[in-house]
Each structure stands twice: as C-alpha cells, then as structure tokens.
Image (spheres, coloured by chain):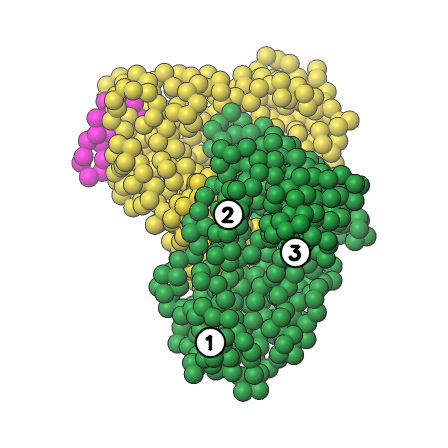
Chain colours: A yellow, B green
C-alpha cells in the first residue's frame, strides 16, 4: 500500500503541471503521479514526430526530468477508486491511499459512429508513445492517406506527412466546414493556410462530409456524402477530442460526455477531496460564461496549477478557457485568441473590426522580414473590449498572440491597445509607427468616434 | 503663403505618426509636415546602417510612402513662429499659416562639456541622412574607434561596427556605470550582452569616466579619469539625447533643458493650439508619476497619435512613458520593460522577484531552440503588480517583452500572469507547462503566500 498525501491520475499536461506546481509550493508533501503510458509525450509535439523530428522518442519528456524534480511516476492503469476510504486500486492489484486526488485523465480522440470506423488502418492521434510508433510505421507504408478533419491536428499532421520522406503519397484532408481551421482562425487566414497546404501537394476537400469508410478488412476508400470516393490505404480521424470520463463515471462523479467531469471554478469535482484539471474537466468561456469546448495544453497547464494550489485551502479560481492558439503551416505562422468574426456572429456578439498589415521588421528588408504580417482584431461594439485577435506572421506569431491573449484576459479595450507602448526593434519587430496591433486597434477607436 | 489647417514641425517618429493618424481620423483636413532633413531615416535603424544594411539609403523611409498617404512634406528649416497670428516663417522666407500646430522637433545628442569635444572626428548620432553618410565614411576610414557611452545606442553601433567590413579595427566602449545597458537592463543580462560584445573583439571599459578627448586638430586619444589613455582616430559620443527645445524656447513656450517642452497629459503645450510630442516633449513615468527621461521611438509614436487625436477636441490622455525596449547583441536578444531591480531599489520600491529559464521550443531540440530563454520579473511587494520585466531569448524577445509591456500598462499582478493562458506551439514557444513568464510569476505568487 502506497500512501502519498497527493495522488495525481494522469501524466500529461495537467497532471505533470500540477505535480510541478505542488513541488514548488509544498515540497514536503508526498506525491505520486499515476499514468497509463510508458512515457509522457509532448502532446502538441505529436504532429512534428512525423516530419520535423522523424522519431517518437524525440518527442518524449524524459523521466529523468521528473526524477530531478523529485516527482515519482508510476506506470499503471487505475482499476478503481474507493472514494470513501480514499483508496486507488491499480491494475496490478496494488493500492494507493491518498488524502487529496487530482484527476487529469485527459481526452480520447472523437471517433464518429460511421460505417467502417473499425476497419484496419483507421487511426487517430493518441498520446501513447507505443501507439505512435505503430502509427508512424503505418504512415510510412501508406500511399493514399486521407485525414478526416481539417482542424489544428488534421492540418498539422498532414503538413508534416508531406515532408515525412521521399516516398510519393496522395494526401487528402476532408473538412465539413467551408474552410480548414475555421473554428479558431479568421477566414482570411484559413485561406492562407489552405494555399500553403496545396503548395505542399495536399488535396483539400472542404464543405465535405464523410459518409463511410470502405474496405473489407483494411480501409480502402473514403466515401463522401456527395458520392465522391477517395482511395485510401490509411485514414486518420482528426475530429478533435472528447473528455475521458470513464474513471470519473465509474466512481460516481458528476460528469457528462460533452463537458467532462463537472468542476467548479476552484477545479473541485463533486467528489470529496477530488479535483480535476485539463481535457477531462469541464470548462467555460470567459467571454460568454457558457460551457467551452476549448481543450488545449495551455488550458490544461493553467488548470493543473489552479487545482494544485487549491488542494489544501482554496487559493485561486479559473477565469475560464480562453483558447489561445498558434501554428505553423508551410512558410506562414498563424495564431488566434478569442472569437473569429464568424463565431462572434454565431454568439450574437456585435463587433467592430480593425485590420492592419505591414512588414514585421523596420525597414522591411532586414533579415527575417516579410512585407505583410497582419493583425485582425475584433472588439465588442458595446464597450470596445477585445474579444478576438488573429495574427498571420513569422516565428514571433505565437508571442504576438500572447500580447492579445493577455489583453483579452485583462479585458482591455481598443482605446487602451491603441496607445500602449510596445518594445520595437529594427531586427525584431514592426515599426513603432505601424505596429499592427496598434494600427488595428486605432481603426476601431476611430470607428467608435474617439 | 501656405495655409494648411494643421502644421507639424518635425518629420520623424512623432511627427509622421501624428500625420498618419490625422489622415486616418480627419482625411479632409489640410496638413503639412515641415522637416529639416532631406529624408526621414528610421531612427532605431541607424546602428544597422553600418553593419547589416551597409548603406544609409537602405534605412530611409521613402517619401513615396507619404505621398501614397497624401501627406505633404516640406524640407525646410523653421526660422520663427508668430503664435498670435499662427504663422510659421521658413528659412527661405515663405510663410505657413496654421490653425493647429504640433511640435515634434525631437532631440539632439547629449554632448558633455569636456576638453576636446569639438575636435575633428568626434561624432554623435544625428537623424540626418547626409550627416550619416559622412559618419559612415569616417567609420570606414578609422582604425581606433572609441564609443563613449555603453547604453543602447553605443552598444548597438559598436556591435555593428565589428561587422562593418574586413578592415581590422580596435573598438572600445567606455561606460561610466558598472555595466553596459545598465539603466534599462537587468544586471545579469548586461553581463550576457558584454560577453557577446567581447566575443566580437570589442574592448569594454566599464566604471570608467572620460576626462578629455585629446588631439590638436583631429582627435587622437581618449583620456580616462583613472589616467588611462586610449588611442582613437574617431570618437562616437553615445550618451543619449536631450530634448530639442530651441524653437519652443524662442517662441516662449514653457520648457526646460532636462524635461523638454512642458506638456499636459493631452500633449498640450503652454502655447495656444500648440501641441508637442516625442523626444522634445516632457514625460512622466506611469510607475512613479515623476518626470521620465525615457525617449524612445515607440513613446514618440504614441504621443504623436495622442496629440493628433486631441487637436480638435480633447479625446485621449497619455498614461506616461513606460520604456519598453529590445535589442540584439551578437547571438542573443534582450529586452526590458519597467524597472530593473537596481532601479526599483533606487526608487525605494520594494519588489518580489521571480525568474525562470528554459527552452524556447518544446521539445527543446526543435529548430530555433535554445536551452535557456530566461524571464526575470519584478512585482511590487505591496500589491503584487508587475513593475519590471526582463527577457533574454531569440527573435521573439521583443514580442515577449510586449506581453509584459501590456501587463505593466494594465497593472496586472503576479496572480494574474501566473494563471493566464498563453498560446504555445512546439515550433514557436516554450512549453505551456514551463512558459517562463508563467513560472516566474508563480514563484512570486508563492512568495506572497497565495
């Protein structure tokens, strides 16, 4: 019987961040992380295994890192939890007795109930290094790969498959919405990303629903609702993730399939001394206060920290899942926080939009310069508060999104963003007189008559 | 007699940003920019003329850009202004009658009253392309260059001189403070910058005061207070800038040599319908509310926008000059906003400091990755508000500083910065579980017992 004071079930973003945070704030307390994989993969790094890294092992967080931080990890499946006696039973029969428990069981790939979904060579992305090894081998052997779903995971994996090796392959993305990435990214930038994908030889079928996967034993084709049939010897389902609530449901915590384990703003579940964090936990949007389907590593890490802080006395609350993204597609980087104009319309939020494009260096011809880094900012008409920010640029795109992420989370207005001072430098940024965030915000200030 | 409704005297950061802003908000109003140079140089780009760009013309903002925006520019010196009749007299005798006037006369290099300051080949950085051509020629001919002042301008110019051409040169920086860049940059990062400079073959003499420049006609040597004599056939004075208040003083505006033209928070001077913006205008620190010597392009641009917005009705105020910087020294980038620990001590502000270092990619071996991107954050002990942020990293450093610049200007706390969600991506940023700003802020949260 192991008796750590704190048990954490799940060894990915939320679980390990919680563990690290506990080591920072309560190094004297006993701690055990239980995970059901042999090693922790960097979740957002998975697509880059297949192209840039070319090895699963390169995308693994070495356990030595956790040993250095004095964080013990046990690789075991959890069989059951007795929440009254606070006892976890592992698959090998061993028991772990805890005082406080964090569930960070993550998510599972969303697999639609369609004909052929159980055929051989129909895959999804799982955060398990052994599974990813098999998937990598399957990718290499395949000649006609169809990726179902053109969100971040589908786009990133396909973009990397195009640069996997010298073998010629037919790569196709099938997306139900009018554009890839459209749930998070402003439409103009979705089009830019699609151009990049096409330039890499990828076929994109948007506005297309998959009706069935065909084949006898192994998948042979993908049939679309419009009757088109795409030859396929490997299908990757990239339709997002659904909270992994199997264990939570088994032990009687309040949860549902869409939202996950229901938590309050302190990340407390309905179970005594049980917290949940990350993809498995319910979330709300700070902008609408409604349930949110944002499931990101960054959100998981924040929630892991919040849960860790609250175990022995409630310290801090979550402000909601804001959804700040960035990615690289071919030669461009795009990133977003908050609403697209499309999403704002769907939510019934009236917005004013400012957009500014220009060089990311000053003068523009300096090394690393592009002529058309662009910012598109959406502010609520009612009060001028930033509710959506979209950037297309180069390497610094994610950090520019983070300027907007902080601004969104702090509730800043167009008036504030337009006259803030930003650090600028010829070799690193746009000119201070044409800084894109400032210029886009100023357009909205003028629209608001200020 | 020209009769633009709005006259702007000065064609650099503040003047041109004001002009661009007026074209955005009041395109129907007549406008004239009067400048005393043949072309506008990118001010912060000047150091990069000598190394990276290798031509003054490459650092000029082409007038065609202003023509496209329908901004007329007149290259003339201003002789006088009659503020009663609102008439500007130019050096060529022509007159310009205005309704509203913005003074954006900038700054002049600070030249200490020391023996030898008027010798030939003693130079400073002036924002005049013709002067910069002469300076570039002089740099090329020189073999022993001494730069007096190890602030941003001194460090950036010397770093670029080391990569100017194949001619061997002795390059020396003399700085009175214990470290180069110390007024803005945290001491640890000053040391890093100095290492980079030494690696490039530059000699650094810190804690050294210059007593005299020696020579008969042309400068031959620099004599230090400790008696050391450094051979020099060119001396560059890089001791910062002083507000150019010649014209303002002549026409009787309230001003003083240290602070410049005194303006209120609306950027109004003591003269009727006369505003001032940029290096020539007085500033205050948003952190101390005391006069500030921060004179940056970014501050000038913000002030130009504020002045432009207020000409025909007071619309917006300045929140003060915050001082957000970034630069490149050899292979590292460093950037800062707000106080260093040294400056906070001098101001009597008690701070709590968090620091976090780690890769800027995840996993760390991805392209562009370094193992030790570092954030040092200072929060006011009293209320946990961010009052200083310092970053050492790569290309995205300036934009990371801008996350902190926005946070400082919005008055965010360690508690807020620690649990914000930041956009992260393997190829673009640190890991979400080890994002440096988050980790440094969390240390302070824990120090504060939260």
Please identify the quadrant where the N terminus of chain B is shown.
bottom left
Residue B92 badge:
1
Specify the quadrant of the image occupied by residue A153: top left
Question: SS for tag 2?
Answer: helix
Please name the residue shown 79% across and 44% down the image.
Answer: B225
Q: Nearer the viewer, residue A263 or B438?
A: B438
Q: Nearer the viewer, residue A439 or B63?
A: B63
Q: Is residue A221 highlighted in magenta?
A: yes
Tell me the subunit letter for badge 1: B
- Residue at mark 1 to residue at mark 3: CA–CA distance: 29 Å
Disc on the earlier residue, 3 or 2: 3
- How far is the residue under mark 2 from the one under mark 1? 30 Å
Answer whether residue B215 is visible to the viewer in this image. Answer: yes
Q: What residue would you read off at disc 3?
A: B118
State the image coordinates of residue B134 (x, y, percent, origin top left): 50, 52
**Callouts 3 and 2 in the same chain:** yes
Badge number at residue B136: 2
Q: What residue range appears in magenta?
A: A220-236
Q: Nearer the viewer, residue A82 or A298?
A: A298
Say above or below: A222 vs B211. above
Q: Quadrant of residue A278?
A: top right
Tell which of B73 and A48 is nearer to you.
Answer: B73
């Amino acid at each position: 019987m192991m008796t750590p004071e704190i048990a954490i079930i799940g060894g990915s973003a939320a679980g390990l961040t919680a563990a690290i945070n506990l080591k920072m704030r309560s190094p004297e307390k006993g701690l055990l992380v239980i995970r059901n994989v042999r090693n922790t993969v960097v979740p957002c790094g998975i697509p880059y295994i297949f192209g840039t890294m070319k090895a699963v092992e390169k995308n693994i967080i070495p356990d030595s890192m956790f040993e250095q931080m004095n964080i013990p990890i046990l690789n075991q499946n959890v069989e059951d939890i007795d929440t009254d006696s606070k006892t976890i039973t592992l698959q090998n029969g061993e028991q772990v007795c805890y005082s406080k428990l964090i569930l960070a069981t993550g998510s599972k790939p969303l697999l639609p109930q369609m004909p052929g979904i159980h055929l051989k060579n129909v895959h999804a992305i799982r955060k398990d290094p052994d599974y990813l090894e098999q998937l990598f081998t399957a990718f290499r052997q395949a000649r006609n790969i169809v990726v179902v779903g053109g969100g971040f995971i589908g786009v990133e994996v396909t973009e990397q498959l195009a640069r996997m090796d010298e073998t010629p392959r037919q790569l196709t993305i099938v997306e139900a919405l009018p554009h890839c990435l459209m749930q998070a990214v402003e439409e103009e930038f979705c089009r830019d990303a699609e151009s990049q994908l096409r330039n890499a030889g990828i076929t994109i079928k948007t506005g297309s629903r998959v009706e069935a996967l065909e084949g006898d034993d192994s998948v042979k084709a993908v049939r679309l609702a419009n009757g088109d049939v795409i030859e396929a010897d490997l299908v990757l389902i990239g339709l997002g993730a659904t909270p992994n609530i199997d264990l939570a449901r088994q032990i009687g915590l309040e949860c549902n399939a869409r939202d996950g384990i229901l938590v309050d703003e302190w990340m407390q579940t309905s179970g005594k001394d049980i917290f949940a964090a990350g993809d498995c936990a319910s979330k709300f949007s700070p902008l609408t206060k409604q349930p949110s389907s944002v499931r990101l590593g960054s959100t998981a890490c924040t929630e892991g920290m919040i849960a860790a802080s609250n175990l022995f006395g409630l310290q801090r609350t979550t402000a909601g899942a804001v959804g700040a993204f960035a990615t690289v597609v071919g030669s461009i980087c795009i990133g977003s926080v908050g609403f697209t104009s499309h999403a704002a319309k769907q939510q019934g939020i009236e917005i004013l939009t400012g957009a500014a494009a220009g060089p990311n260096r000053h003068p523009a011809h300096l090394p690393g310069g592009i002529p058309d880094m662009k910012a598109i900012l959406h502010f609520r008409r009612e009060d001028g508060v930033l509710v959506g920010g979209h950037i297309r640029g180069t390497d610094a795109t994610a950090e520019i999104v983070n300027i907007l992420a902080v601004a969104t989370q702090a509730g800043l207005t167009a008036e504030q963003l337009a006259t803030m001072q930003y650090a600028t430098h010829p070799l690193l940024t746009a000119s201070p007189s044409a800084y894109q965030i400032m210029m886009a915000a100023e357009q909205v200030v003028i629209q608001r008559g200020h």
